[in-house]
Image: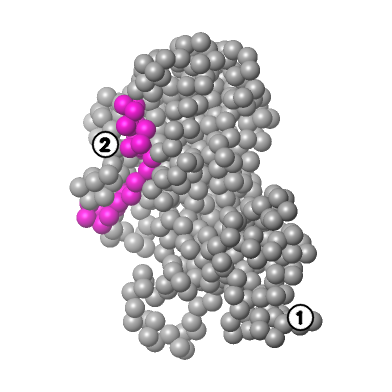
Amino acid sequence: MSLELKRESVWKLVDEAQHKEIFNYGERYKHFLDRAKTEREATAYIVKEAKKKGFISLEEASAKKIRVGDKIYMNHKNKAVILAVIGENLEEGMNIVGSHIDCPRLDIKANPLYEDCEMALFKTHYYGGIRKYQWPTIQLSLHGFLINSKGEKININIGEDEDDPVFFINDLLPHLGAEQNKKTLGDGITGESLNIVVGHSSYGIEDDKNPIKRMVLEILNKKYGIEEEDFNVAELEAVPSAKARDVGFDRAMVAAYGHDDRICSYANLEAILETKNPKKTAIALFVDKEEIGSVGNTSMSAKFFENFIAEIMFSQEMYSEISLRRALSRSKVLSADVTASIDPNHKGVMDERNAALSGYGICMSKYTGARGKSGCNDANAEFLAEIRDIFKENNIIWQTGELGKVDQGGGGTIAYILAEYGMEVVDMGTPMLSMHAPIELASKADAYMTKLAYKAFLK
């Protein structure tokens, strides 16, 4: 018997059938990525897939007495989703996998459209922890939702189809970049300079002051019924227009926008859809606003999940405040969020003995936080041992990792919020590279193992 810990790559441990399924899963995941570039689009996708598998809305389920085995969903304000497969006595707690469906991006400001230097542009306000220098000179698409002055609900999706135009942020040419080159990476591009080119032609427009802006407004009005005032009440996001693509001669990795955290969200979705007759109620959470601190009424800090459980208990004629508190405090959670994989080009920021490796499976992070574990949920040994046993029993390939060297920084997830109920919580997610970049990189093997891990935990 070996006393030493030996980590091995997923690629070396799987059999032929699993190797084939890794790539089949990768195709399904890429399909999701290309159709769910915003939290609203992700919500619509998740609800649609859940309905195909027999999930019914909370309202429909509550019209009758909810029973063991029922499959229920709640669409919360079109920006968050809960999927539940009802088990036995809910008061004994739940098995929960909690992921988030918002991603770093550029939001369009309330008064965005202006004309300058023979171009029409949109002003933006970045969302989440981006590196601003990465966003100029890439092709962008516009996604969003608004209600115009006529009361019409309008979904915007421009830049994804091959025939669509795309949008663009300019940067300085190197010939004129001497002063910019003296600045730090963080200061080289400012937030207020992330302005998106949306038009250039003034052909046929009789407007002496802003003919290009006028052209853009006329196009938007003709196609969508939008007036400039409608931007004041719109939700518009600029995201990379690139499709999810295989990387490498072996096609073993995926480059895409939104791996953080849709790689965990999609694994969570497949896992809950394949969960049948669990003894404990199985819950998949898909929440919003994690990238800006989990604030707002669609974030994990809101009470919609707690209210969802209260509604189920009420339908089962077992609701009381103490029963609800018991159900929450006795629950166990995998906080499904990505972690950093060690990068061969930037190894110096990682502790190699405690860093996740791409291709070595899903990663357990006992704690996140910053430096001295500030702001983290630090999981206890009893729960970690329980997770290890589940993974052993189900042949899950997994590893442990931290988000960089101790003094380098850190990050946060929704783990601490669920832990406030008294739940057992640990961060468990997919290792990835170039996190928060417009295009991120992840291993298909790790993505597949993430799905298997969540499925094993939920059942």
Q: Indicate left or right for 192 with 39 as reference.
A: left
| Observer-nearest of 24 and 437 | 437
Q: Secondary structure at mark 2?
A: loop
User: How many other residues sit within 10 Å of disc 1, few (<14), some (14-19) or many (≥20)?
Assistant: some
Rendering coords of residue 93 (x, y %): 40, 19
Query: Label 2: which residue?
Result: 378
Image point (50%, 78%), residue name? 171
Rendering coords of residue 422 (x, y %): 31, 26
Could you say which quadrant of the image residue 137 lies in? bottom right
Q: Is residue 418 magenta?
A: yes
Report the amino acid beneath label 2. Asp
> Over which residues does the magenta segment extend?
402-430
Q: Give the mark nearer the N terminus: 1 vs 2.
A: 1
Q: Nearer the viewer, mark 1 or mark 2?
A: 1
Q: Indicate left or right for 374 with 82 as reference.
A: left
Q: CA distance from mark 1 to mark 2?
A: 62 Å
Query: Label 1: which residue?
Result: 205
Location of the N terminus (image quadrant): top left
